[in-house]
Image (cartoon, coloured by chain):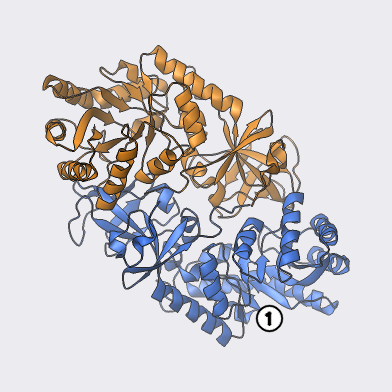
Chain colours: A orange, B blue
Amino acid sequence: MEAVSVIGMSKWDLDTPALCVDLDKLQANIARMAASLSGMGLGCRPHAKTHKCAAIARLQLEAGAVGICTSKVSEAEALAAEGIDRICMTTSNPSRSKIRRAMRLCQRHPAFIQAVDEEGNARDLSDAGREAGVVADVVIDVAVGTRSGIPPGEGAISLAQLVDTLPGLRLRGILSYDGGVQHVVGYESRRRQALANMEASVETLGAMRKSGLNTEIFSGGGTGTYNIYHEVPGFTDVQAGSYIFMDMQYLAIGGREGPVYSDFSPSLTVMTTVLNDRFPGRLTTDAGAKAITLDMPRSGVIGEPGMDYDPDSDEFGIITFTEASRSYRIGDRLELIPPHCDPVVNLYDRIHGIRNDRVEVVWPITARGCSQ
Amino acid sequence: MEAVSVIGMSKWDLDTPALCVDLDKLQANIARMAASLSGMGLGCRPHAKTHKCAAIARLQLEAGAVGICTSKVSEAEALAAEGIDRICMTTSNPSRSKIRRAMRLCQRHPAFIQAVDEEGNARDLSDAGREAGVVADVVIDVAVGTRSGIPPGEGAISLAQLVDTLPGLRLRGILSYDGGVQHVVGYESRRRQALANMEASVETLGAMRKSGLNTEIFSGGGTGTYNIYHEVPGFTDVQAGSYIFMDMQYLAIGGREGPVYSDFSPSLTVMTTVLNDRFPGRLTTDAGAKAITLDMPRSGVIGEPGMDYDPDSDEFGIITFTEASRSYRIGDRLELIPPHCDPVVNLYDRIHGIRNDRVEVVWPITARGCSQ
């Protein structure tokens, strides 16, 4: 309903809640990650689950990304429909109908890669590939932890051998994503844990290579470990997502230089309006859980470190504070750093690209709601 | 991307995560609320913030609702564009651009009502009404608590008097929504608190009536208090939302007859697929925080009361259990009752209407993401 005429408008005048990204910071984050990884001899395969936005994927590919990751087949479909190629779907996909959807993508986009983590699923994928007349690229999802993927070791190696023999599939290597370690606080403990957790995957990859299997891809990692995995033997590319936006969760993990993780700048914000100023030390805003999610730690109010932002009301945010830099009145705007970027972006149909506080562009969130 | 050909399909075969509503239960819930309120001499003005769906709003109006509530102007715009009339926007709207949007709605839908809770805002609304050539219907939002609305008493009465004199506005009465009391556990304590919390609003309404102001609308209440407010003098209609779907939060508040609130049947579910069955007492599914939210208490797995469902992973649900009714394998489906219906519905673009386990209809979530 919002008119296209917001172009040129100050972000402080946007109807709220409004999702915004600072374009200078976004572009600097993309450039910094690309340069850092390339300096460490690694590729960048950014995860689009964070932004779900074809325009941002395009910026990442233009900056030299080797490909783009998606979590779900519906995300891959939506981005591919907007011209994004070289997509790697990082989650296994065990249902027949979604396997068919994935193979239709393979037909149109031969560079599409999908994860597999189980023998039955590998056979189903191969059958579907043959039926679709394609040889589909797959990577073995080698687990770190218990969430998803096949545990490293014998089982994973057998699965890779099976994939190598299946007529509808082409083995490209492995992915090994350690979700848990990304938010470990403190660079040194994060590094120690990250490297220890990857040892079994490294051994599995080594055994695969020894038995003559293709190991050209060894993908994993994220924003919290992008500057760690170059120490992992055979590792090829990083699937970082959040680095383009940052959020309260990543700011809190600490960097090499101190307690705030400042390698990338927080570029993603939500503009909100004060609806109630009647009570001392308290404000109500128009951005609740439907606009900023319940993730922890809570949203940061830019310029107001003393404010606590409670979104535990679907339609309203409740701010409490003992000190503020100024007084706020009904109708005043505040700018929030989201707790966790991925699920917040997933609430909005569009994102306002801001430069020098003005709207330069409005991008659709191409794959918003694509959870299948 | 999902084809329209899901009509007739078993809900157990849908690509997941998939949002579903059992149509028999939905219709029974709508009929039961309509009959109960009418039996108590009250109107039903269901809140569309719960479903954001024009098709469901239509069912509610057909069942005799006196109108439909929305929280935000963008919700009202989206539903009005689909032919839903008699909308009452229950949140005040202090920004100039959104006031203009609301007045454009008034031009096309003279039955549109909006909440006001502050003198400056009332004057702005009146000016915008005159500019748009309309006399806009408003209700005073009389606060229960500190979240939104003007506190009851002198200030609220003065505001009503001001509205009555402003040329662009027509006073219709008040609304007084007690969000906090809806989830008080135990019918008797809920009733006691609900009635006590409304006393000041009742007095305010009485004073308004005495001074000759229009008090034809005294709206408020929700699913937790629908069978309490007929005891509130002058009260006219209930803004219940969740009763059509129910959720884990409302099931837990307790009813007149026992610890489970069973006045309405849980009709809303999310279908999910098992992605990992490798570890005893543990399953991974494909419905994480982007599909089922972080609200508490956690999702219920239908038929598996011993399962705990942790969605604290954006893309995955983590189930842990000591006992289950059967064993589950990769690819198996589970059906979840969401923690809190409103924000879960807001994640999906469509809802599958299910009868006897088959898809009868697919409805767009008309106002999904309309948080402005």
Q: Position of residue A120 (x, y in %)?
A: 15, 45
In the displayed structure image, the side of residue B301 where residue A169 appears, left or right? left
> Toward the viewer: B5 or B308?
B5
- Assign a secondary structure to mark 1: loop
Residue shown at the point (84%, 64%) measured from the top left: B168
> Toward the viewer: A255 or A66?
A66
In the displayed structure image, the side of residue A129 where residue A310 appears, left or right? right
Residue shown at the point (57%, 47%) measured from the top left: A310
In the displayed structure image, the side of residue A8 where residue A289 appears, left or right? left
The chain carrying label 1 is B
| Vertical comparison of B103 with A193: above or below | below
| Vertical comparison of B95 with A221: above or below | below
Can residue B50 be spotted in the picture?
Answer: yes
Residue shown at the point (57%, 74%) measured from the top left: B192
Can residue A252 be spotted in the picture?
Answer: no
Q: Position of residue A152 (x, y in %)?
A: 18, 31
| Vertical comparison of A35 with B73: above or below | above
| Vertical comparison of A110 with A28: above or below | below
Residue extending farthest top: A39
Q: Position of residue B356 (x, y in %)?
A: 32, 73
Residue extending farthest front: A133
**Residue bearing mark 1:** B233
Q: Position of residue A238 (x, y in %)?
A: 36, 25
Q: Which image quadrant for residue A107?
A: top left
Residue shown at the point (52%, 84%) measured from the top left: B35
Q: Which image quadrant for residue A199?
A: top left
Q: What is the crowding at mark 1: few (fewer than 14 residues within 10 Å), some, or many (at least 20)?
A: some
Amino acid on which disc 1 is placed? Pro
In the displayed structure image, the side of residue A363 where residue A15 appears, left or right? right
